Image (spheres, helix red, strand yellow):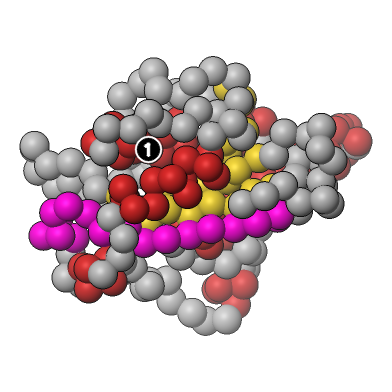
């Protein structure tokens, strides 16, 4: 990925990234990275400059389910012929290193998984120049007006469709959710006496997915449940906490 001429050279690019992993269901099991997806975004224009995604074959294929409980989920067959993490590590490093990292609950989940994956192949992990964890930012600034802070819930609140739980689709949804939240907050700050506090109850809203009569796909227990602490913009190396799940 190279910087685009459409973004000023002085602006630090933002990389929104997401991992899909196995879900440990018993003590002693570990997370295996199954997919990496990222988009490079110009912070001045919020336009996508480049993108990359790849499935990843885990060392232990038996840890991947034969069938997925999610629509478009990742199966053992899907990753059987995918590259191992070591084969795509250079590419992932070049995408992440020296950029601002962004994502939903990345500080507690994705950052930890990235560090583990690079450590396993004996390589230093990439480092960010800053971090935007949208879970913390939106919890603090936008609040729970959508019902909870899961990405799927926020996307439904804004009528952005159904979360796919695939890395590239999820990071693009993450960016759109942030844009929508920022617009609402801007409007509220412009007319605080009129708009502040007038949140809509999500149960009264008709979303695109509901209006189309589509039933949501059955979901597995997510490895990405939000933590209870509030995390915002971090200008520090993100490997200081233990891993939790993710939205």
Q: Quadrant of the C terminus?
A: top left
Residue stretch rendered in magenta on the structure:
48-64
Snapshot quadrant of residue 35 = bottom left
Q: Residues within 10 Å of mark 1 (few under 14, many from 20)?
A: many
Residue 211 against residue 45 in the figure, above or below = below
**Of the pair 241 and 182, the residue shown nearer to us:** 241
Snapshot quadrant of residue 131 = top right
Image point (62%, 68%), residue name: 206
The answer to whether residue 54 is magenta is yes
Residue 101 against residue 35 in the figure, above or below = above
Query: Would you say 222 lies left or right of 133 here?
Result: left
Snapshot quadrant of residue 130 = top right
- Residue 51 at x, y = what percent? 59, 58
Image point (36%, 73%), residue name: 71
**How many numbered marks does the figure carry?**
1
Query: Would you say 149 lies left or right of 77 here?
Result: right
Image point (8%, 37%), residue name: 27
**Of the pair 192 and 103, the residue shown nearer to us:** 103
Which secondary structure lies at badge 1? helix
- Residue 80 at x, y = what percent? 22, 68
Inspect this view and state whether residue 84 appears. Answer: yes
Image point (90%, 36%), residue name: 191
- Residue 227 at x, y = what percent? 39, 31
**Of the pair 204 and 88, the residue shown nearer to us:** 88
Residue 14 against residue 175 in the figure, above or below = above
Query: Would you say 69 lies left or right of 230 here?
Result: left
- Residue 58 at x, y = what percent? 22, 54
Query: Would you say 69 lies left or right of 100 here?
Result: left
Inspect this view and state whether residue 150 appears. Answer: no
**Of the pair 182 and 34, the residue shown nearer to us:** 34
Determine which residue is flagged by label 1. Answer: 114
């Amino acid at each position: 990925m190279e910087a685009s001429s459409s973004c000023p050279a002085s602006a630090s690019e933002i990389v929104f990234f997401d991992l899909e992993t196995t879900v440990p269901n018993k003590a002693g099991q570990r997370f295996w990275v199954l997919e990496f997806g990222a988009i490079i975004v110009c912070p001045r224009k919020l336009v996508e400059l480049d993108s990359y995604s790849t499935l990843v074959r885990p060392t232990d294929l038996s840890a991947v389910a034969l069938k997925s409980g999610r629509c478009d989920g990742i199966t053992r067959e899907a990753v059987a012929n995918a590259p191992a993490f070591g084969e795509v590590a250079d590419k992932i490093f070049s995408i992440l290193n020296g950029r601002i990292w962004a994502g939903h609950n990345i500080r507690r989940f994705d950052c930890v998984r990235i560090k583990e994956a690079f450590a396993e192949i004996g390589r230093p992990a990439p480092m960010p120049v800053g971090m935007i964890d949208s879970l913390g930012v939106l919890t603090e600034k936008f609040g729970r007006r959508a019902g909870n802070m899961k990405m799927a819930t926020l996307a439904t609140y804004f009528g952005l469709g159904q979360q796919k739980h695939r890395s590239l689709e999820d990071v693009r949804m993450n960016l759109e959710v942030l844009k929508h939240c920022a617009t609402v907050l801007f409007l509220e700050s412009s007319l605080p006496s009129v708009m502040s506090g007038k949140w809509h109850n999500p149960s009264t809203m008709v979303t695109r997915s509901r209006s189309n009569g589509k039933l949501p796909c059955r979901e597995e227990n997510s490895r990405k449940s939000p933590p209870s602490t509030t995390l915002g913009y971090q200008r520090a190396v993100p490997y200081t906490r233990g891993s939790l799940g993710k939205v």
